[in-house]
Image (cartoon, helix red, strand yellow):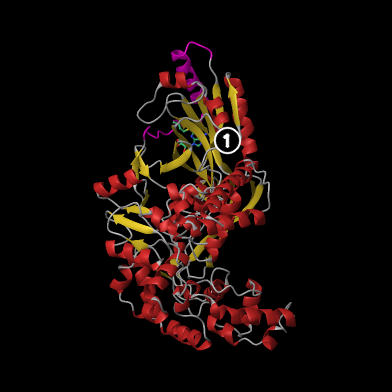
Amino acid sequence: MTREEARKRIEKLREELNRHNYYYYVLSKPLISDFEYDTLMHELIELEKRYPEFFDPNSPSQRVGNDLNKEFEQAEHEYPMLSLGNTYSREEVMEFDQRIRKEVHEPFLYVCELKYDGTAISLVYEHGRLIQAITRGDGTRGDVVTDNIKTIRSIPLILHGSGYPDRFIIRGEVFMPFEGFNRLNQERIKNGEEPFANPRNAAAGTLKMQNSSLVAKRPLDCFLYYLLGEDLPTDSHYENLQIARTWGFKIPEVMERHDRLEDIFRFIDRWDIQRKELPYATDGVVLKVDSLRLQERLGSTAKNPRWAIAYKFKAEQAKTRLLSVSFQVGRTGAITPVANLEPVQLAGTVVKRASLYNADQIKMLDLHIGDTVYVEKGGEIIPKITGVDFSQRPPGSQPVEFVRNCPACGTPLVRKEGEAVYYCPNEDGCPPQIKGKIEHFISRKAMNIEGLGEETIDLLFRKGLVKNITDLYDLKPEQLSPLERLGEKSAMNIIASIENSKKVSFERVLYALGIRFVGETVAKTLARRFGSIDNLARASFEELTETEEIGEKIAESIQTWFSNPHNLEIIRKLKEKGVTLEILEEKQEETPALLNGKTFVVSGIFEHFSRGGIKETIEKYGGRVSGSVSSKTTFLVTGDKPGPNKLDKARKLGVKIISEEEFIHMLPLHKDQ
Ligand code: IVH
């Protein structure tokens, strides 16, 4: 393939993938199978790697995110990001309408939309390309989260059609649909991480993650509901959004124009019911004056526009009786109180249990057994108790006491200073903790041992065959096959899978060990920094906390883990069995000569490299470094404060000028593919 052919193919692939993204994520009408899509994407990524000169920050391949951990820059909003005045009462909606009619003496329309319960985002487009995404922040300045936003496939990186202004801003709500939210939380619980309380927190937390390749794995989506700019197509908010749809934006599916309050209330009533069938969270209805001219005339207060209001739906609530409280033990030993309730119908499901979070929450509610309690299902999937009807408290009822001893093994519980959670410290002897650790160890993202479910682990534990993770490596097929429901073939498969797990990379083994606060990302960082389990075990507190991302809490947890003789014994046994406990060198063998034939000039101060470091990297990948710009230069890589002479010369000679980030994107290791 010639360079020119490659350029054309890359362009074609980008176009195709953009089109498929739009059909799949905006119109929900996929034209091709996932497999076909992945094949096209794979081809594009490979070509872009081979021809880094055709790098484009808006290529669909950039939606996988990158592995750079960075603090977010901040940027000023060109138009302040106001919030909406909100109300739960119809009277206030009527008053809002009256205020407007006092000012506006001509016929006008309201647009009724749903109020999406996520986190607000402001997108800047120039010449049809997404150039910046800013969070709401304090309304005046927000975090620049462009890389994270690019991972949301329904947000167009390059616009379709025509007629869009040269520069405009479009705002909307980033949200996580229920299905993806539930999946994410199940995974977090399995990994011993704190689940998100509701999809809104999950969306906001995800947008603030520092590593966009992890964001890419979270199921975010976005509705865009507000256009801003100088040359918008029409005077109508409603029409403009319909037009924005043809540019590739996902605009609200539900939008109606009305001029009579009666119809507006009908819209509200209808959607208070129908919203329960939507696959994402909404918490009200937004009313907006349709005409931009009238919007401007009505203006804003310091906080809210006068031309819009949010009517909020009441969270669904039910009253029921608290029968008892049980205490569950997680794999990290954390104790979670759960309320057992008299079954009650709430938001379409029968609720029997509600989460109580921790001891403080129980105290705050002043809960007694037998109390009549209010349960709510707001954005939360697991209902929560929000209050007690004290007038119905049975005489002589007992306050709910948080257990002092572990409900599974009887060990006295401990609570660390500054933490809300009680823990069972008997890590190595408490059955649910041991079983939880084994389940975590074999899970897909850890050692990926297949064929062993929760029940089989329970059985193996009860029969005394597996008392900790190292015992897995001593299992024999003849011990497995007589177990309930396991045949000879499954037993052989399990043994083979256990054997295979010895080849799993060090970073995953480290994650699999289940050290508190060492999730996937932290494990990766630690593996890269320390290279082997022995180095990590020897690392001082300072060495740990000097590592990027590792704070005192994590460092302390790592040191505690390694100071436990039981854990050292586990490491010794894993080593004996041949599990990978260091980074294997062979991984580094193939440094592809990606930058072969290219000459670079570097200028300015770089964030991720020293001056020498960036030169070394270029040479490592086969590129040449030169001190001055000439017609032979392929790229000028600029950091902060680049030399003006070099810049001028590069511009004159038509040498491509790229940023540090663009340079990093040329390298193969920045992606988590
Ligand atoms: S319009 C100036 N429309 O609600 C008005 N906002 O407190 C700009 N929201 O920050 C916002 N759904 O995050 C608008 N259909 C919708 C909305 C919506 C949700 C959020 C948005 C805003 C907050 C208002």
Q: Residue at x 57, y 57 (%)?
A: 1
Along the line of sight, the residue nearer the viewer: 467 or 486: 486
Quadrant in which residue 82 is drawn: top left
Tell me the kind of residue under disc 1. Answer: Pro
Q: Residue at x 36, y 49 (%)?
A: 655
x, y percentage for residue 542? 28, 72
Dot 1 falls on a residue whose secondary structure is loop
Magenta span? 78-107
x, y percentage for residue 596? 43, 63
The 10 Å Cα crowd at callout 1, few under 14, some 14 to 19, many 20 or more, is some
Along the line of sight, the residue nearer the viewer: 511 or 2: 2
Residue designated by label 1: 252
Relative height, residue 296 to residue 82 (above, below): above
Q: Is residue 247 left or right of residue 628?
A: right
Relative height, residue 84 to residue 342 (above, below): above
Relative height, residue 666 to residue 463 (above, below): above
Along the line of sight, the residue nearer the viewer: 122 or 431: 122
Along the line of sight, the residue nearer the viewer: 7 or 347: 7
Quadrant in which residue 15 is drawn: top right
Q: Is residue 560 left or right of residue 510?
A: left
Residue farthest toward the front in the current orientation of the protein: 631
Asked whether mark 1 and ligand 1 are closer than 8 Å, the reply comes as: yes
Residue farthest toward the top in the current orientation of the protein: 105
x, y percentage for residue 123? 45, 39
Q: Residue at x 62, y 76 (%)?
A: 457
Q: Is residue 365 visible?
A: no
